[in-house]
Every structure is written in structure tokens, then in C-alpha cells.
Image (tube, helix red, strand yellow):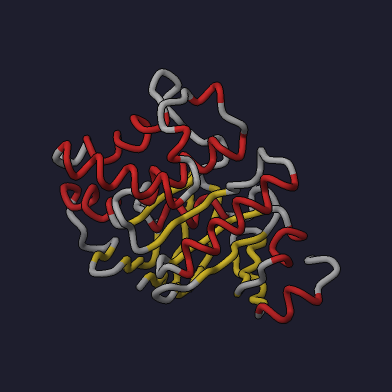
Amino acid sequence: MIELFNVSVQENKRLILNQVSLRINKGEFVYLIGKTGAGKTTLLRLIYLDLYPSQGNIIVENYSSATIKRRQIPYLRRKVGVVFQDFKLLPDRNVYENVAFALRVIGASRREIKSRVLSVLTQVGLNHKRYHLPHTLSGGEKQRVAIARALVNEPFILLADEPTGNLDPEASRDILELLEDINRSGTAVCMATHNYELIKLIPHRTILLDNGEIRREFSPAEVQQLKVIE
């Protein structure tokens, strides 16, 4: 489904990722962990081709970073949902419009937009707040809107870059449980996080990045038993 083959990324003569090879299977839930600057965000950006590798190749479904045309990139991104730590909501639009925006830009019909937006807002538990503006929402609710927006195009994978980084512990657990529910419905999830205690609550395959390299991979059982991830 997603494969990285000996991928390296260099920016301003600095090596950010070094010879990374990784496979994420259909319907899988994977955590990316590591210190700030380890390369987690860079790896996620590569998957939706916000960044190209300096070396190596990336396969995302039927697309290859080596051969994809620029005009094809928007079609790839419709299949990859992305959620950020800082939500990136449009402050002057309500919850419904924030989610609908992702469908308007691809020319979906009004009927389709209404159906899909209401469905995905129900999925994240925010249908009752569809007319609220972002500033009236809690941090956890804002992240749920961001997740709904990422899901409305029915992607095969959801990339979550520190989605609980700005949330309190209770909201963080709620978001993780929502991502788990989304994964159970068939959508793959790749979540980058610093919160090593959080991943123990719902353990999955976990990849440790350090200085741009994959240092170690942990099974779900190993994650639960770890006291400290070095």
C-alpha cells in the first residue's frame, strides 16, 4: 500500500532522513516515535508528496515518486488524509463549512457535499456543532473537525502529525480512541507522536526514528512493556 525504498532527504546540505525503508500495509495502524528533529514529519510529508526524496523511491498505492506527474499529485492527496497538531481550521467558517471545503475544491455536488459532511461529522461526534465557529470549540473538538475534514474524501490512509500535541490528557485519549475507531472501519492510520505513554493505551506496531534513521521497531506487546523508549 505504502512503501519507502532506501529513501533519503537532504535539505541545505543537512541529511534529514537516511536510507529509510518502510512498508505500511492496507488497514494497518502504525506509530512513528522519536525526538524532535528525528524525521517524523518529513516522513509523513513524503507520503503525500509535499516533499520529494533526494534519493530512493516512494510508492503510494499506484503512484511512484519517481514517475508521478505534477498534475497527478492532487489525485494522490485525495486518497491520503492529513491531520496536523495545530488543526489548520478556517477561522471564519463554521464546522460544516470547514469540512465541506475539502469537497468543494474537487467540484463535488451540493447534494454529495451535504451527505458526506453530515456523515463524517456524525462519525467524529460533532454533528450537533456543525454551525459553530472554531473559536467556540475546545481543543479536542477542533481536532475532531480536522479529522472529519481529512476523512471526508474517504482516504485509504490517515496521516496524523502529533494530533494530540496541543491537547490535555483526557482529550488526547479521546482522539486516540477516535483514530482507533477509524482504523477499525478499514482506514489505515499512521500517527507521529511524542507521547509515549499514550501509545501504551492502544498499542500498535511502533517505529522509532532517530537522527533520520529507523533505529528500532516495536511490536504491540513490546510497546506495552516499555517503561522508557530510548
Left or right of 181? Residue 33 is right
Residue 51 seen anywhere in this rendered image of the structure:
no
The residue that appears at 26% across and 63% down in the rendered structure is 66
Q: Position of residue 76 (x, y in %)?
A: 26, 55
Is the C terminus in the top left, top right, bottom left or bottom right quadrant? bottom right
In this view of the protein, which residue sits in the foreground, 227 or 69?
A: 227
The residue that appears at 32% across and 68% down in the rendered structure is 59
Is the N terminus in the top left, top right, bottom left or bottom right quadrant? bottom left
Q: Which quadrant of the figure has residue 197?
A: bottom right
Q: Position of residue 184 (x, y in %)?
A: 48, 70
Q: Name the residue at the front extreme.
A: 128
The relative height of residue 148 versus residue 129 in the rendered view (above or below) is below
The residue that appears at 36% across and 33% down in the rendered structure is 96
In this view of the protein, which residue sits in the foreground, 224 or 17?
A: 224
The relative height of residue 2 versus residue 88 in the rendered view (above or below) is below
Q: Name the residue at the right extreme.
A: 227
Q: Position of residue 141 (x, y in %)?
A: 56, 37
Left or right of 4? Residue 103 is left
Residue 223 seen anywhere in this rendered image of the structure:
yes
The relative height of residue 115 versus residue 101 in the rendered view (above or below) is below
